[in-house]
Amino acid sequence: MKQSLQLKLGQHLTMTPQLQQAIRLLQLSTLDLQQEIQEALDSNPLLELVESTPADDVVPGMASSQQELPEEYAGSAEREVAESDTVDDVAAESMPSDLAVDTSWDDIYETGSAGPAGSGEEGQDFEQYTAEASTLSDHLLWQLNLTPMSETDRMIAMSIIDAIDADGMLSVSLEDLAEGFGPESGIEIDEIVAVLHRIQHFDPVGVGARDLRECLLIQLRQLDPEEPAVRHARVIIDKHIQLLGAKDYATLMRRLHISEPELKAAIHCIQQLNPRPGSVISASAAEYVVPDVIVSKRNGRWLVELNPEIAPRLRVNSYYAAMIRRADNSADNVFLRDNLQEAKWFIKSLQSRNETLLKVARCIVERQQGFLEHGPEAMRPMILHDVATAVSMHESTISRVTTQKYMHTPGGIFELKYFFSSHVSTAAGGECSSVAIRAIIRKLVGAEHPRKPLSDSKIASILEQQGINVARRTIAKYREALGIAPSNERKQLV
């Protein structure tokens, strides 16, 4: 076979480092993005944080992009538009091979912005700098150190505390504890029981119980035994806890020979107890959700804007940029060139992320105005393909930009994925969102009679009367997703 040279023309998609960086930043959550920005600031001397946002930072002669927005969003913040166009002017230019000596770096790079301004020191929550929260084990050991005990009892108590789980229940049997000490220690189970009883009266009361019955009885012993409700509650927990779990109130009244008001008072007393006493001592710090997008209604129109807290404003350091010289291939100059290019691409990638997020959020708000006006029952069915078609993007991009991104609305903070849901057909030939069906189920359950809670079949029948055709098993699936118990467990005394 004869060898020859051939020239072919073809097209293929190449994932450049810049495109990979833009995709990676797009799918980061707010906290991950802030960490990424900090790492870029630490590693790139050409990148710096803008401490303030003076009004004269805007490049003269910028074309406003606000005319491209839908009419209902024409009132979005001017700051966001100014920052967006400034970055386009800065980052759209490619890095030239030779830089003119008389280039005005201040005019080009001083106003480069990666997003809205941060809040600075004044907006920080100083509660996050408090001391580390103690665990349940630490809390019990602290009380143990204040309790006079012999060395043997203290050793037993430490073993018991080590065997208590996060809910405050004893996770091993007394026999296993006794075996752990070994036969040479001479420790009997009676000694372990005596120490266990002392620990069970530590704070929180009931910690170290071996089962739910013992846990509740320990807490009831702290109440006034002369109270009729307390006496009845102790009998119910001690002998009839299974009937209470099954909510067989008629059998309970017959077994205890009490009236319905007396049973109601006893159940109310039991409901004040904590079945998981260890849960009140939590070592986990509260995690707060920072919304990426803020939605508000002004002058009868829904406006969408980026949260100024999610990312600081970035720009290229003009001092280091002015040190770059053309036709200079020294190591220092090459280092500055490379970092300048990286800084430009990082700023552009951040701005691209913000623009994409804002565009998708506006599309969601435009389609879900019924939800914003009337609540979850007015949620329209929507899938990723609907938004992808509206904003001319791929579905994978929409999926990335809606994951771990949150929207602040007058009705609360919701993840962007919350607004995407499947649908069921209605009798009129329309569609109803699964989110709206869940909201209707929650509303029906909230308004039901406590003595006669609605069954899944009854809820399906009510929805069918409203023109929504939903099977009983679908109702059961939605009810479980909402954390609502079955009808037999929701039954209560009036």
Image: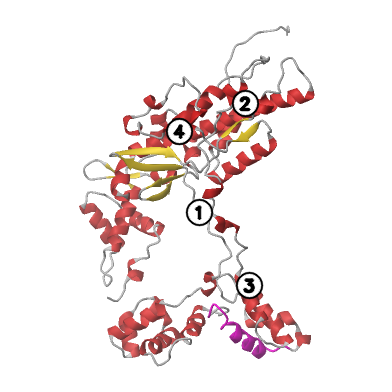
Residue 106, given in percent of the width and then of the height, sits at: 60, 24
Distance in Å between CA atoms under marks 2 and 3: 52 Å
Distance in Å between CA atoms under marks 1 and 3: 26 Å
- Within 10 Å of the Cα at label 4, are there few (<14), some (14-19), or many (20+) other Cα atoms? some
x 72%, y 18%: residue? 325
Task: Determine which quarter of the picture holds residue 428.
Answer: top left
Task: Name the side, left or right, on which 158 lies relative to 281.
Answer: right
* Quadrant of the frame with the N terminus: top right
* Marks 1, 3: nearer the viewer: 1
Q: Which residue is mark 1?
A: 288
* Marks 2, 3: nearer the viewer: 3
Note whether 96 is above or below 236 in the view shown.
Answer: above
* Marks 4, 1: nearer the viewer: 4
Question: Circle 2 sits in a helix, a strand or a loop, which is it?
Answer: loop
Question: Circle 4 sits in a helix, a strand or a loop, which is it?
Answer: helix
Q: Which residue is mark 3?
A: 137
Note whether 271 is above or below 197 in the view shown.
Answer: above
The disc, 4 or 1, on the residue closer to the chain's N-terminal end is: 4
Distance in Å between CA atoms under marks 2 and 1: 35 Å
Q: Which residue is mark 2?
A: 16
Distance in Å between CA atoms under marks 4 and 1: 26 Å
Residue 176 visible within the image: no
* Marks 2, 4: nearer the viewer: 4
x 22%, y 45%: residue? 427
Q: Which residues are magenta?
A: 187-205
Q: Which residue is mark 4?
A: 79
Residue 3, given in percent of the width and then of the height, sits at: 73, 8
Residue 174, given in percent of the width and then of the height, sits at: 64, 82
Q: Amino acid at mark 2?
A: Thr
x 40%, y 85%: residue? 233
The disc, 1 or 3, on the residue closer to the chain's N-terminal end is: 3
